[in-house]
Image (cartoon, rainbow, N blue to C red):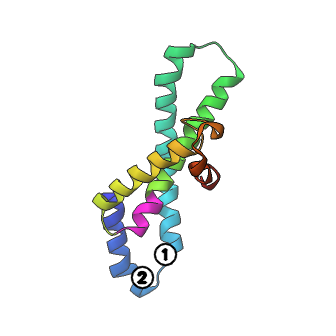
Amino acid sequence: MPLFVTQRELYEVRERPSKAYSWKAFLFANFIVEVPYNIILAILVYACYYYPIAGIAGSLQQGQVILFCVQFFIYAGTFAHLCIAALPDAQTAAAVVTLLFSLSLSFNGVMQPPDMLPRFWIFMYRYD
């Protein structure tokens, strides 16, 4: 996130006034640059967590687990980029991302299914 803040400041000072490219292109470029790193890290995490537990025996579950790992890391990376794009500095964004990500995990059925949620919080399951 701190790197994104410096890139955003550079964009606002140099690129926006010259109209070299738009804000959408800047965000898209930042997202695309992070995707290969997220995929590599997801494969590393998959290898460290899946093989000690399940072993090397081939199955369809291995493919599903690696796809879920890749999807999770790309989601987390883009979620952090979207939050830092809206907030002024990296410290505030880190606090907000941590809060929103923990709320997302708590209320979208990862920690508990929707029938276990208190009645008031069921809207959070549908929102996530």
Q: Position of residue 83 (x, y in %)?
A: 43, 61
- Is label 1 in contact with label 2 (beta carbons under 8 Å)? yes
> Element type at marker 2?
helix
Give the camera-side residue of 13 and 125.
125
Give the magenta part as a residue range.
Answer: 81-87
Q: Quadrant of the N terminus?
A: bottom left
Give the camera-side residue of 121 and 49.
121
Relative to 5, 48 lies left or right:
right
Q: Position of residue 8 (x, y in %)?
A: 37, 70
Residue in the picture at 40% in, 79% down: 15
Q: Quarter-wise, where is residue 109 in the image?
A: top right
> Taken as a whole, is the magenta stretch helix, strand or loop?
helix
- Residue denoted by label 2: 16
- Residue denoted by label 1: 23
Question: Marks 1 and 2, how far apart in space?
Answer: 8 Å
Q: Is residue 84 above or below residue 99?
A: below
In the displayed image of the protein, which residue is found farthest to the front?
A: 119
**Precedes in sequence: disc 1 or disc 2:** 2
Q: Amino acid at mark 2?
A: Arg
Give the camera-side residue of 79 and 109.
109
